[in-house]
Image: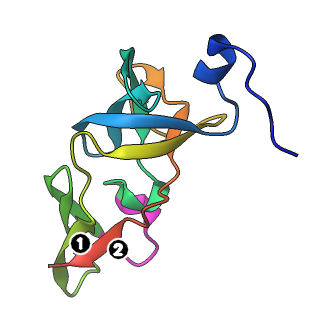
Amino acid sequence: MPVLVKSVAEKQINPRFQLMRVVTIENDYLTCKVWDGTTAGTVTHNVAKPYKLRHVVGNYDLLTTLTTTNSQEVIAGDGSTTESWRVTPLYEVNDLLYVRRVGFTEVTVGDDDLWFVDCNVDGKQWAVV
C-alpha cells in the first residue's frame, strides 16, 4: 500500500527514499541537496557512495592495493597486476540520485558519521580503462 505524503515536512524526511541532486563528488561520498522536482533545497547533505564504489582496499577481497587517481578513478592491484578502474557511468554534478537514510554507512566526514547512502539505481560500477 503506498504511503501518502501529507505535509511538506513529511515530504522532506521520507523514510524510504529521497531524491537529491549532486553538488560535488568526493572519493567515498557525494555532497547533495534535496530535489523536489523543480527546486534544490538549501541544506547540503553528505551521501555515502555505495560500498563497492568507495576508495577502500578492505572493501574488495582480492585486492592488496587501491590507489586513488581522482574521485572517480583508482588503480587497483592484487599483488601481481594492476589495473586502472573508472566509475561508469560517471557521477556528474546535477545528477539525480535516490538516497536512503540508514543506521550507518561506515563513511565519516571529519567527525561526522554519514547516515545517507546512494542507492545506485543507475547501476554504477568500476570498469577497467
**Residue furthest to the front:** 38
Residue 64 image offset from top left, x and y in percent = 31, 71
Instruction: Look at 69% across and 38% down and name the residue there.
Output: 16
Q: Which residue is mark 2?
A: 63
Q: Amino acid at mark 2?
A: Leu
Q: Is residue 26 left or right of residue 56?
A: left
Whether residue 126 is situated above or below residue 115 in the rendered picture: below
- Mark yes or no: residue 129 visible: yes
Residue 31 on the magenta span: no
Q: Is residue 50 left or right of residue 109?
A: right
Q: Is residue 120 left or right of residue 11?
A: left
Q: Which span of residues is magenta-colored?
A: 57-64
Crowd class of label 1 (few under 14; some 14 to 19; many from 20; radius 10 Å) = many
Residue closest to the eye, 24 or 77: 24
Instruction: Look at 64% across and 12% down and name the residue there.
Output: 9
Instruction: Look at 49% across and 30% down and name the residue there.
Output: 114
Secondary structure type for disc 1: strand
Q: Which residue is mark 1?
A: 76
Residue 36 image offset from top left, x and y in percent = 47, 27
Whether residue 22 is situated above or below residue 27 in the rendered picture: above
Q: Is residue 15 left or right of residue 91?
A: right
Residue closest to the eye, 10 or 27: 10
Residue 89 image offset from top left, x and y in percent = 27, 65
Residue closest to the eye, 12 or 39: 39
